[in-house]
Image: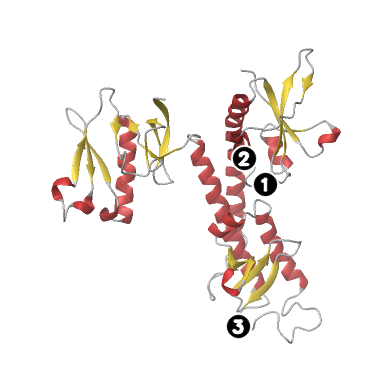
Amino acid sequence: MGNIETFVCVDDRNIYPALIDRENRWNGWVSPGFTLDAVRRLAAHTTEMAEQYGHDCVDQITVIDGPVPVVLHVRWQWFTEEPTRATNVVKPDENGRYWIGGWEWCWYEVKDGPLFYTQNAAFQAWTLLLAESARRAGEIIRTQMPDATSALLCLEGLGHIASVTGATGWPSDDDGEDGYGPFDTETLGEADEVLRRALDHGDGRTDLEIGGWRPAREIGAPDLHRIVFAPLGTVELGDGPLEKAREEFAEVHHKLLTESVPYLVADARAACPDAGGIVIDPNAESPFVMFLVEGAEGEVDIPDPDDVPAQVHERLTKLLAYKPTGEDLNACGWTESPQPHLDGAYVLVFPAE
């Protein structure tokens, strides 16, 4: 197959342009070759990580400038037992490429290039939104139950808050007929609205767990999620941080939708070279996809392929990860489908090649 230009990553945080042979793998990982500029970026990042996590657990790349740049690969953890193998000079090949970490580091290919950063930023913004929503819901609940420490949520139905844990407990035998414990329905509704707005953007169990909303497995209720409130006595922060988190998420979500479009166009055209656009139903359980193809008479035909290639579905899954609204899609170039039988679907017309 030979070498190709692409992007690679080893720490899930930073990507680097590199040359790889996709067939040359070590336990599934690739072996990349970098330009000197990319090596300098890698050196800066490994230095930051060594300072943050300790030199004994991070290999460090260093560039020494002189008449000829010298690239060093330093393995600090080897100095005690094998000092002669702790450092080696990485020599460039005949094309000026530095091959670093091959058959040693867990390099993997990132085909989306710079979009990788936007995808990561969107996920970080959403996890912050989850955390701030849980905090604010806790503050609202504590107006009527000051010792509340956590809540159990049911992600199905309109009311998400199933129970609240605190020193007094809820519900209890003296809840009365309404079953709402120390709460009035307005307070529960206000707290639940905070949580609902976060769940409008996603409720995948794995993502929620990473974001701190964890299934309550320890009490035998894996279908419920637990959110933990700020420690008792913490100063109330109010709506400010939550509103900021919502604004930051909306901004990066819009960026993700916008930047994803050229990649979707490329994937769709690779799958269907005659495609002039694509139709999707963002609310379908799995993205419903059709390609728009201009027929011989100039009319637009909508063939329905039996098997839309996996890369198109994968791209749409990432694009629709945070449940964009119709307004979100409109702002990024999508329009509602005019066909009555495609109610709820959206159309993206591709730019001319």
Residue positioned 67% across, 33% down in the render: 307
Q: Along the line of sight, which residue is nearer the eye, 168 or 26?
A: 26
Horizontal side of residue 145 vs 30, given as left or right: right
Residue positioned 69% across, 53% down in the render: 200
Quarter of the picture holding the N terminus: top left
Residue 139 appears in which quarter of the rendering?
bottom right
Q: Which residue is mark 1?
A: 323
Q: Amino acid at mark 1?
A: Lys
Residue 131 appears in which quarter of the rendering?
bottom right
Q: Amino acid at mark 2?
A: Leu
Horizontal side of residue 337 vs 152, given as left or right: right
Horizontal side of residue 350 vs 7, given as left or right: right
Q: Residues within 10 Å of mark 1 (few under 14, many from 20)?
A: some
Q: x and y percent of residue 74 in the render?
A: 22, 45
Q: Which residue is mark 3?
A: 167
- Residue depth check, mark 2 versus mark 3: number of the one nearer the observer: 2
Q: Residue furthest right?
A: 340
Q: x and y percent of residue 128 in the render?
A: 55, 55
Q: Secondary structure at mark 3?
A: loop
Q: x and y percent of residue 86 in the render?
A: 19, 47
Q: How far is the residue under mark 2 from the one under mark 1?
A: 9 Å
Q: Residues within 10 Å of mark 2 (few under 14, many from 20)?
A: many
Relative to residue 227, is residue 93 depicted above or below? Answer: above
Q: Secondary structure at mark 2?
A: helix
- Residue depth check, mark 3 versus mark 1: number of the one nearer the observer: 1
Quarter of the picture holding the C terminus: top right
Q: Which residue is mark 2?
A: 319
Residue positioned 68% across, 56% down in the render: 197
Residue 288 appears in which quarter of the rendering?
top right
Q: Secondary structure at mark 1?
A: loop
